[in-house]
Amino acid sequence: MQTKNIVLVVGVLALLGASALLFTGEKKDTTTGDAPMAPVDSAMPVMGGNAPEMMVDENPDAPAVDEYTMTAYYDEKGKWFSLKEIAAKKGDTIRLSITNTKGMHNFTLDEYGIKKELPLNEVVVVEFVADKAGEFVYYCAMPGHKAGGQWGTLRVVE
Ligand SMILES: [Cu+2]
């Protein structure tokens, strides 16, 4: 997520730079005319209107590393993962840092062949490439924990 944002910011900065150059070029061309102020006013809204459109197209298929942090625990109401949903684009790397703060738990994601024990008060990093599209349920395979609420949805879109 952070990587995506940085890429976006860099893209916007590059865009602003390009717009400035473009703007300077137009200004030079039009100053040879009779009314130098008029082109400046008319050019402004056009620049503003173009920027958001181009931001959407910024690296749409670039793979990213999605980092998440969650805890595994239980309370009087059930057993839980603090994160109920993870969304990714196919091909993204998902890096989950999980800390078991109470009880005995594991992180299981059958479709990706993942089953990691979560020792108490240790950060366990689960990292994999989301190379299968669809909706998958990650859960704790300790008896009764999934039924007690300890599961979430991994949503991978094409
Ligand atoms: Cu559990």
Image (cartoon, helix red, strand yellow):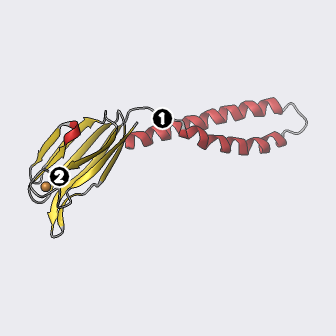
Which residue in the structure is indicated by mark 2? 99
Instruction: Identify the image quadrant of the N terminus.
Output: top left
Note whether 3 is above or below 103 in the view shown. above
Note whether 59 is above or below 41 in the view shown. above
Callout 1: SS: loop
Q: Is residue 136 left or right of residue 145?
A: right
Q: Amino acid at mark 1?
A: Pro
Q: Amino acid at mark 2?
A: Thr
Q: Nearer the viewer, mark 1 or mark 2?
A: 1
Q: Which x, y percent locates residue 68?
A: 29, 47
Q: Which mark is residue 60?
A: 1
Graded by Cα atoms within 10 Å as few (under 14), some (14 to 19) or many (20 or more), the crowding at tag 2 reads: many
Instruction: Please report the residue visible at 88 percent of the width from the left and 39 percent of the height from the top.
Output: 35
Instruction: Please report the residue visible at 19 percent of the width from the left and 57 percent of the height from the top.
Output: 150
Instruction: Please report the residue visible at 42 percent of the width from the left and 32 percent of the height from the top.
Output: 62
Q: Which x, y percent locates residue 79?
A: 16, 61
Marks 1 and 2 sit apart, C-alpha to C-alpha, by 32 Å
Mark closer to the chain start, 1 or 2:
1
